[in-house]
């Protein structure tokens, strides 16, 4: 018996996310998911810039979760919100952060599943069909759908969800005809059902959430007991001074003050290359 066995969570999405969220939540936590698409979540923000998202990624996930709970009258709600940013290492490559939030009114908590991974998010400006055809291949079309706009990314009109070559050709002709510069803007469609790379990342964030849902505080039994902080200062192997390398994980409860420190089992010393004294 899991903590969430036999409870029912609402999930508001119109982009097919239930396919990668529902089965694992049920299998891993025993929590059943009821899906609704009774509200158009695009009204809360689109990746194609027509409607900007208000607030943070977590704010948006929370809003969707609460809406789903209201629509289906549940005390448990799950929602996903994605963001596309530069990668955390160089900032140069497209990166996708997915949040899957659980709101539990019974325990009065929020648990947040997370996954960050490389994104399939390419774009370009095209005036010749041959160039667009070559781009489409590098953008993993047609498994990943495309969006096209006349002139540039700010044009109010677009054709979304393009997934076959003849439709792309037709859309390109339309965009060029509408364009004030003879150029069309084309990008990957980032909606979940149109972007399998993103869908897989939503799946990973859901598994992360399920693992956290199953972890209860040893003190008060509240679910969501997880790593809260990383302690740094692993000593350098050569000089012994503390480095920025992690030395321990701090586990903490969402409700009470209970916490535990888990030392790193693998490494006792940091490589001198990570030391700001030995390798400034
Ligand atoms: Zn606790
Ligand atoms: Zn050192």
Image (spheres, rainbow, N blue to C red):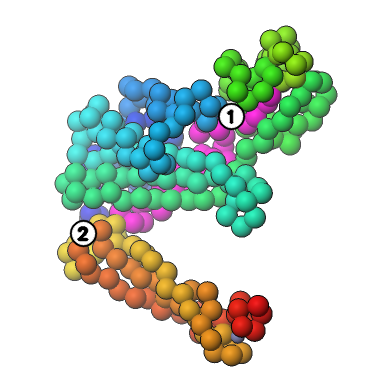
Estimate the x, y position of residue 211 in percent, counting from the top left: 36, 56
Q: Which residue is mark 2?
A: 255
Q: Is residue 56 left or right of residue 199?
A: left
The N terminus: image quadrant: bottom left
Query: Based on the displayed image, in which of its 4 quarters is residue 181 positioned?
Result: top right
* Ligand 1 has an atom within 8 Å of the beta carbon of the residue at disc 2: yes
Position of residue 80 measured from the top left corner of the image (x, y, whole percent): 40, 39
Residue 70 lies, in percent from the top left, at 22, 30
Q: Position of residue 136 (x, y in %)?
A: 72, 30
Location of mark 1 (residue): 189
Estimate how packed mark 2 is, as few (under 14), some (14 to 19) or many (20 or more) residues with alpha carbons within 10 Å: some
Residue 110 visible in rendering? yes
Residue positioned 82% across, 21% down in the render = 128
Which residue occupies the foreground of this view, 195 or 81? 81
- Residue plotted at (34% across, 76% down): 261
Question: Is label 1 in a helix, a strand or a loop?
Answer: loop
In this view, the residue farthest toward the bottom is: 239
- How far, Cα to Cα, is label 2 from label 1? 39 Å
Q: Earlier in the sequence, mark 2 or mark 1?
A: 1
Front residue of this view, candidates 16 and 40: 40
* Range of magenta residues: 185-213
| Residue 77 part of the magenta segment | no
Q: What predominant SS class does the magenta segment belong to?
A: helix
């Amino acid at each position: 018996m899991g903590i969430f066995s036999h409870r029912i969570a609402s999930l508001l999405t119109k982009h097919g996310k239930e396919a990668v969220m529902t089965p694992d939540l049920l299998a891993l936590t025993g929590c059943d998911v009821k899906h609704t698409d009774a509200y158009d979540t695009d009204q809360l923000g689109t990746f194609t810039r027509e409607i900007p998202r208000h607030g943070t990624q977590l704010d948006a996930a929370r809003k969707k979760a609460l809406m789903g709970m209201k629509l289906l009258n549940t005390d448990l709600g799950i929602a996903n919100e994605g963001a596309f940013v530069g990668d955390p290492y160089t900032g140069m490559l497209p990166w996708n952060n997915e949040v899957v939030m659980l709101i539990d009114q019974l325990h009065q908590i929020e648990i947040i599943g997370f996954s960050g991974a490389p994104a399939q998010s390419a774009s370009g400006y095209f005036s010749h069909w041959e160039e667009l055809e070559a781009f489409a291949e590098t953008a993993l079309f047609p498994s990943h759908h495309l969006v096209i706009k006349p002139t540039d990314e700010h044009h109010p009109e677009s054709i979304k969800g393009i997934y076959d070559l003849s439709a792309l050709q037709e859309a390109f002709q339309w965009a060029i005809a509408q364009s004030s510069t003879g150029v069309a803007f084309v990008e990957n469609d980032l909606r979940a059902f149109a972007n399998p790379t993103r869908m897989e990342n939503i799946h990973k964030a859901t598994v992360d959430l399920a693992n956290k849902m199953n972890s209860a505080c040893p003190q008060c039994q509240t679910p969501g007991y997880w790593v809260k902080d990383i302690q740094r200062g692993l000593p350098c192997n050569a000089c012994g001074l503390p480095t920025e390398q992690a030395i321990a994980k701090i586990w903490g409860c969402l409700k009470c003050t209970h916490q535990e420190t888990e030392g790193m089992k693998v490494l006792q010393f940091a490589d001198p290359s990570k030391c700001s004294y030995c390798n400034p």
